[in-house]
Amino acid sequence: MALSNLQYDEIQRQYDARQLQNQHILQKRKTQLYLKYPRLKELESLIASVSVHFARLLLDGDEQAMAQLKQTLAHYRTERAEILASAGLTDRYLEPPYTCPDCKDTGYIGSKRCHCFKQAAIDLVYTQSNIRSVLEEENFTHYSFTYYSETKKSDTTGLTYRETAQDAVRESLLFLKQFDTEFQNLFLYGDTGTGKTFLSHCIAKELLDTGHSVIYFTAFGLFEVLEKHKFEKDREASSSMQHIFDCDLLIIDDLGTELSNSFTVSQLFLCLNERILRKKSTIISTNLGIDQLSIIYSERIFSRITSSYTMLKLYCDDIRLQKRKLSNGADHSVPLQTK
Ligand SMILES: [Zn+2]
């Protein structure tokens, strides 16, 4: 999406603020640490002066002196690492606490925009930042199979609800593992409260944490954006849609709950089709059955989805109701290891 100058400024301000905050945190760490370990402060200025000296020798071309100096420098660094280790810390403690280590919170790698800039633009344009707080809670470390019955079975597959959920998680982990190499889409379906949204949040969190761009929409929100750009001139509308077509992962949650009409249905097809052509992954979750897809949307959307998506059905007694019943009891969730 073409950002306006105001939006650019806003994002740049966020980067500037983050860098400033990093410096504050680092300064605070150093002050506390140097009080307790004065030798660390000495080492910092020794390392700095050696580096300057080294630059001079480099200009003179004095290779023997340079080799000696390199040794001294290594010696200082080892001593510093040892002191830090004795305090239970690593060298990284004396580096700014970057949110994005790839660009050191500048938004650039060399002269190119960092991947985090793309996500910052998405967050700003589509007001996605609220999803971050949700993902702090809804991720694989909080995933639990205990809500899925070990006795009730699906009529179609004969698998228990628990086994079906385990399969879905296994597929999701594979989806994540192969995300950068295999183009894949997921279609999560099943009744209300079967954990479809939760699972899509788990996947979103893993991808955001590994520097991918993710846009999350409820179907209602997506169709609102599609409607909004309906009256814009073609070129503007298509540039507004750019990130929706182009982000690494698009999540469309609760398909079937939006107000659809023939225009939004054709826009939905355009969106899903464009992403398939660009080999960009999409996750759709819905309470609809597969047979309802072609009735509510269209035959071409139905065939696009069934031919390009991995279909994962979840069965469960409404988790929201189960949680409500359990709300006075202890949390029996078993954290799930993802790595
Ligand atoms: Zn970055």
Image: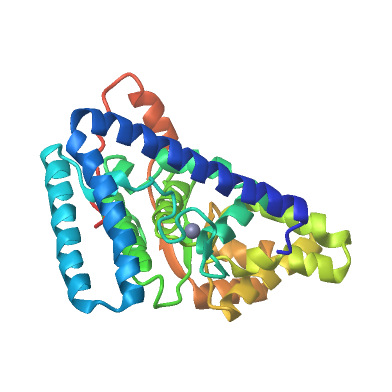
Can you say whether 24 is above or below 10 in the image?
Answer: above
Instruction: Choose top left, top right, bottom left or bottom right for residue 322.
Output: top left
In the visual, does 20 lie left or right of 173? right
Residue at image location 70% in from the left, 50% down from the top: 9
Residue 310 seen: yes
Residue at image location 74% in from the left, 54% down from the top: 225
- Depth order, front residue of 310/61: 61
Q: Position of residue 135 (x, y in %)?
A: 44, 43
Split into 4 quadrants, where in the image is the N terminus?
Answer: bottom right
Q: Position of residue 144 (x, y in %)?
A: 29, 43
Q: Position of residue 85 (x, y in %)?
A: 13, 44
Residue 220 seen: no
- Depth order, front residue of 198/46: 46
Q: Position of residue 267 (x, y in %)?
A: 74, 67
Can you say whether 37 is above or below 48 in the image?
Answer: above
Residue at image location 44% in from the left, 60% down from the top: 211
Residue at image location 15% in from the left, 37% down from the top: 87
Total numbered circles:
0
Split into 4 quadrants, where in the image is the C terminus?
Answer: bottom left
